[in-house]
Image: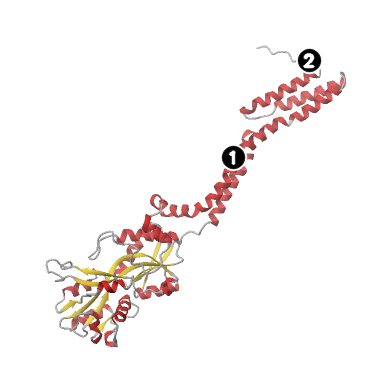
Amino acid sequence: MQSREMWRIYGPVIALAIAGFVAAYFLMDPAPPKTVRFGAGAPGGAYHVYAERYQRLLAEQGVEVELVDTAGSIDNLRLLDEGFIDIALVQGGLTGSSEAKKLRSLGGLFEEPFWVFLRNGVPAGDFGDLRTLRLSIGPDGSGTRALAASLQTTYGGDWPKAARMSLPTADAVAALRAGEIDAAAFAASPDAPYVQDLLRAEGIHLLAFERAEAIARRDDGLSSVVLLRGIADIGADIPARDVPLVAAVSQLVVREDIHPAIEAVLLDAAGAIHAEPSLFSPSGRFPNLTNADLPVSRQTTRFYRDGPSFLRRYFPFSVANFLDRAWVLAIPLLTLAFPLVRAAPPIYRWRVRRRIYVWYKDLRALEDEGRATPAGEARTSVLSRLERLQADIGGLDVPLSYNDDLYRLRSHVEFVKQLLGAPPKPATAG
């Protein structure tokens, strides 16, 4: 009986709370997608290798990464703009105002030097001297070609078709070795095998960008780096002197509408992958926002300033994401729950006491009727009804903490009976 009474009071409160949380679950921000598409560049390239590392790290968090082979940075930007991919590595210095409307940068990740290799004896001491030579600047759609074309514009002058050849990487390396072209440009990691081969090749040398710092100051997506003497091969002293270079800072670029949880897990992965030292940067320099040439979200800015959120530090990705989405709706639900919980105990006390006090109405009516009835058979009828009332009250079941109210009622019934002339009950032998 007592448990049924408690469920009558607390049951609706519990049901309302459960219903509120269920509604919150369906009304809160949508869960992040389980699969994302990553523009990985050409198989075998540095971008593809990095994309595979992102794929492995995100898989550990329950996010499947589908790698999409592309022609390079320009192709990545096009596919991002069309919504065919969600994430890509993009060479810095290639974006403009149109890309800034739909895309966001998660920061610079690594420096990708612009290498220009020339055959020995070619009369060129500066990049601007190459306009009269046979120069390959990479295939259409590649970041190499876009950066080379941008630098040709920066240096000014007329660059004829012969100085804008579009040979693929392997073909350009072979043509340079064979003497079919005078120079070839590549935007690539220093670890790229063909870069290492050309640094050691007989009859070929690397062009220095003596004004690299000035060029970098003109473009947020570029930086000035120095290939230190001997860093490629200390024993062979390669290169034989410090070589200043222009480098594009590759960025992790996402669509503006990407889910914040995916953005957060990408930032975590970027920190794990790109904090390692390289030939051009010390440990911990990347990732950063210094060379980002696209807008960044508030979450990205907060991440670089404060690190991962509290939830991401202490909970797995799936749990942290759920709590991050649910807390906004949990606040109004808890605000509603507190007064309900506080109101339940007084309501419960009132309902229990009401089961006791409701009998006083009948008791008062019988007392008034008995007082108005002269002694005799009529009053005996009133006393009989009082006996039945007393028996009914004796069957009440209330919590122990309310027994004092119950026994007070029973003593009041006995008092009214004696008031109306009922003989006192004999004491029970102990």
Which quarter of the picture shows residue 409?
Answer: top right
Give the residue displayed 37% in from the left and 57% down from the top: 305
Q: Residue at 70% across / 13% down in the picture? A: 427
Would you say the residues marked 2 and 1 are in contact, meaning their CB atoms lie under 8 Å apart? no
Indicate the amino acid at tag 1.
Arg
Label whose residue precedes the other's in the sequence (2 or 1): 1
* Res 342 label: 1
Residue 199 as seen in the image, left or right of residue 58: left
Q: Which mark is residue 416?
A: none
Percent from the top left, x then y, of residue 102?
44, 70
Q: How many marks?
A: 2
- In this view, 400 is above or below 126: above
* Camera-nearest residue between 269 and 152: 152
Specify the quadrant that holds the N terminus: top right
Outermost residue, top side:
429
Which quarter of the figure is the C terminus placed in? top right
Relative height, residue 392 to residue 330 (above, below):
above
| Mark 1, secondary structure of its residue | helix
Q: Which mark is residue 423?
A: 2
